[in-house]
Structure formats: C-alpha cells, structure tokens
Amino acid sequence: MELHTLYHGYIYGDQRLPREQPKHWHFWLPLIAYYSGAYSDEIGHLQLCDIVEHQQILCFHFHTHGKIKARIVPIHQALFDAGLNEYIAAVKQQGHARLLFDLPSKSGRYSEKVRIWFSGEGERAGYLQKCDIPNIDQLGMKTAVSSLRLNFEQQIRIYAIQAGTKDAFNYLLGFNEYELTEFSNVTTLNQICQQIRVINPHINWHRFNQRHTI
C-alpha cells in the first residue's frame, strides 16, 4: 500500500505543489531504485556511459559502492515506458555526462541530498510525509530510500528461485556470495528483472514536466 501511495504521489501525478522546485532526479531516482535495487549513491554516480548493452539487452552498470560488488542490472521495461530513452536524449542534448545531472553531491556523495528530500529532516518534510507516509517504521527506524532495495531483493529472490539460479540473485544484489566478477547469461538476468511488478503503468516523464501548480 505504501509503495502504491509513493508512486502515485504528486511527483507522478498531474499537480505540482506550491513552492515545489522539481528536479529530474526527483522523478527518476525512486523509479530506478525500485526497478534496479541500487543504492541512491550508485544511481547518482551513473554516467551515460554506464548504460551499456550486453547480449542485446540494455543494462545499468553499477560500480561505485564500496560495500557491494560491481554488477550490471538489466533495465526494466517500465523505465523505458516512463520515457527513459527520451530523457537520455535530452541529457545528451544538454551536454551532460551524468544521468541524474541535477542531483548535487556533498563530499562526492549523492545519498545525503536524496535522504533529506525523501525522508525529511527536522521540521522539513520529505517526499514521504508529503505523500502521508510515515518516515518511521514499526521498529522505530527511519524509512529511507534504501528500503526500495529491500523490496527489490524480496521480489528477485522469488524469481531467481523460480529460474533455478541462486547465483543470479547474489549477482544482481552485488553480494560476495557470487564470487565471479561477471554473469555470463544476461538473458537470464533480464528474465528475472522484467518480472518486477509494475508499480504504476501511468508514470511518464513528460507528464512530470507538464504538471500544473495547485
């Protein structure tokens, strides 16, 4: 229910909040996190050259997190349906090299800015609160955008088991249990990733750009 609310919030609707200062990364980062299981800092670091083709399948190449391994994750069709190709073309046209070019870093990290925008800080409400979602879970822990990785992990675990490959699960999550640096069968990875359930089929980047202020 909270995921449904999150991806039907004002960012993905038709109305812009008063005094909202929309950024392209507000739209894309939660989507990429949900469909790839990547951490916000990994997503923030993505360069256009990190969108790579393997076995005729477009993938994200994540390789900037110190605690988990580099990996490629096939791009879910829902991201293309949301306008990813058009967005990439716009980023190229503007001469940027980084996918989320308008996400600023702090000491070389992008996660801090994402954390404040997503979960809030002090009296400043985050996207969660503005969607009427608690930013504290039942265990008293602050809800973070990294929670989306847990959702990805839960779904991937099921689909990898169904495909009979625990290695694919460990590889897609960047776990050390998969000892090799590459996964040879990208088609299998893609079959697993494409089963991630579509959270809102009406999400579209052009719709985000055309929202009207309330």
Image (cartoon, rainbow, N blue to C red):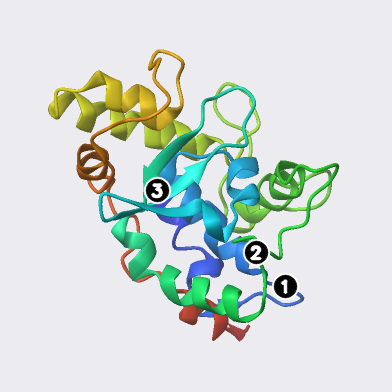
Residue 60 placement, left or right of 47: left
- Crowdedness near tag 3: few (<14), some (14–19) or many (≥20) residues, C-alpha within 10 Å: many
Q: Which residue is mark 1?
A: 20
Query: Label 2 sits on what residue type?
Result: Ala
- Check disc 2 and report its element: helix, strand or loop: loop
Q: How many marks?
A: 3
Q: CA distance from mark 2 to mark 3?
A: 22 Å
Image height check: is 178 above or below 160? above
Q: Residue 97 bears which disc, if any?
A: 2
Residue 67 at x, y percent in the picture: 61, 22
- Check disc 1 and report its element: helix, strand or loop: loop
Instruction: Please give the name of the residue rendered at 60% of the width and 36% of the height, measured from the top-left corner.
Output: 143
Q: CA distance from mark 2 to mark 1?
A: 26 Å
Counting residues from the start of the chain, the first of labels 2 and 3 encountered is 3
Residue 48 placement, left or right of 107: left
- Crowdedness near tag 1: few (<14), some (14–19) or many (≥20) residues, C-alpha within 10 Å: few
Q: Which residue is mark 3?
A: 35
- Check disc 3 and report its element: helix, strand or loop: helix
Instruction: Please give the name of the residue rendered at 48% of the width and 73% of the height, measured from the top-left corner.
Output: 13
Counting residues from the start of the chain, the first of labels 1 and 3 encountered is 1
Mark 2 or 3: in front is 2
Instruction: Please give the name of the residue rendered at 45% of the width and 31% of the height, measured from the top-left corner.
Output: 150
Q: Residue 203 bears which disc, if any?
A: none
Image height check: is 122 above or below 162? below
Q: CA distance from mark 1 to mark 3?
A: 26 Å
Instruction: Please give the name of the residue rendered at 65% of the width and 42% of the height, measured from the top-left corner.
Output: 41
* Quarter of image, res 136: top right
* Quarter of image, res 158: top left
Image height check: is 41 above or below 19? above
* Quarter of image, res 180: top left
Query: Label 3 sits on what residue type?
Result: Tyr
